[in-house]
Amino acid sequence: MTNPSCELDPNEDKIREECGVFGIFGLENAASLTALGLHALQHRGQEACGIAAYDGQQFRTERHLGLVGDSFTGDDPSQRLPGNISIGHVRYSTAGQTVLRNVQPLFSELHTGGFALAHNGHITNAYTLREQLVKKGAIFQSTSDTEVVIHLLARAKEGEFIDRLVSAIRQVDGGYAFVGMTEKLLIGVRDRFGIRPLLIGRIGNSYVLASETCAFDMIEAEFIREVEPGEVVVINEDGIRSFTAYPNASSRPCIFEFVYFARPDSIVGGKSVYEVRKRMGQRLAEETPADVDVIIPVPDSGVPAALGFSQATGIPFELGIIRNHYVGRTFIQPTQQIRDMGVKLKHSANRSMIEGKRVLLVDDSIVRGTTSTKIVRMIKAAGAKEVHFRSASPPIKYPDHYGIDMPTKDKLIAANYSLEEMTSMLEVDSLGFLSVEGLYWAMGEKFREEDAPQYTDHCFTGCYPTPLIDRDRQLLGGNQLSFLVEVA
Ligand code: AMP
């Protein structure tokens, strides 16, 4: 089956988020466990975080701009947010969207009772749905695509709460994982291709939902299974029930979780992220060898692949770049100017491992080329004789539309320049990328070019699993929809 969206060549999106979600049902001090789970998911979003809890009488939410550790410190969070049902969210968004009213969980009073919702991903038809809802009288409180789901749920007419939820979910498309809660239920939903991750865990008789297994490890929960593509799971005191939102769902999780997004100690789709990244490095060594004295990872994202490269070739691995852990990831700075400075703030050269040597730098990916350019200059200034660069993923040629922050196509270096041009722009002696076949090999799979791919790999192939319904409207900022920007 060829995919109709493979031909699309999208350029831009506007409402986008990198996020992590967490939920727990049936344990005292649920909010404290949620705060711990969010700590483990912090790498998925560093701009904002929030927790909602219900104590049998009242819903409470606490939402902050900033890190989990800075927001939920001091007193035990469950003192302020008591109850044994809780959900939480960590968030990263693009400029203009970082306002408290967009921070999740979002809470609404529906005619079925209180409802809190946290979302990782992106709803690709959010603009169309939002416009239809506004025309029918809906009043939106945020600019987040997540709120569309709440309005659809509020307007669903038939049946029990779950029937209404399923009918609302059927109207949204894209890549998403939702964690929601009512007075009596914890709910998990995954999109029809399982693009964004969502997992079920257990502590005793209580259930936990999270974006990654590292959150289960944090609270000593046992991993049970993944929420299936198109599945809605509903947890209450009788246990767990499963509903099908999309009968024709098929599994096509996002491959970029393995490349960059997931924490290396997480298990995604039954595979160790760390092991997969090492295999990417091993295969990279076979595909694009380098005659060098030392292999240096760009920390932290390049470490497993650099180790794999080193172990495959016998070339020594050294920590030639030291990362300052007290600044955030490069991408959390929304402007180019600050991002440029951010690279220097974040990395410094370990001169004794570099001077007079032929150095191979390994990173997980090259996006704009900003990080690599700065790092190459830094390594040269530290006295390297030669500098070679390898990306442990294929050239990123297409933007994401399913909740991973990616710049527009005109800013993706590999979308605009040849290997030769990039080699000279990065000022390196040689440059190499892993092939798409090599990436699939590292995942233990065979790349099926002619077939429906096993993963959502559009960043490398341009093959988007869903139609990008509102792509052009996103380019124009939603046409006639005015998204309020709060300046104070
Ligand atoms: P760039 O400087 O734009 O080429 O970005 C490359 C660096 O950003 C690499 O070190 C990657 O580890 C990292 N990176 C790749 N994708 C993302 C993303 N979606 N969000 C944040 N950082 C990323």
Image (cartoon, rainbow, N blue to C red):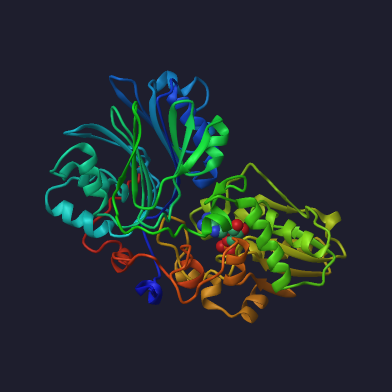
Q: Is residue 322 left or right of residue 40?
A: right
In this rendering, does residue 48 appear at all? yes
Taking 108 as reference, is 28 above or below it?
above
Name the residue at 19% across, 57% down: 131
Residue closest to the eye, 396 or 423: 396
Q: Is residue 126 left or right of residue 175?
A: left
Residue closest to the eye, 226 or 404: 226
Name the residue at 52% across, 26% down: 73
Taking 424 as reference, is 259 above or below it?
above
In this rendering, does residue 340 appear at all? no
Taking 192 as reference, is 82 above or below it?
above
Quarter holding residue 125: bottom left
Name the residue at 52% across, 55% down: 257
Quadrant of the rendered image holding ligand 1: bottom right
Residue 176 percent location from the top left of the image: 38, 51
Q: Quadrant of the N terminus?
A: bottom left
Name the residue at 38% across, 59% down: 250
Residue 265 percent location from the top left of the image: 62, 45
Q: Is residue 43 left or right of residue 138?
A: right
Residue 14 percent location from the top left of the image: 36, 59
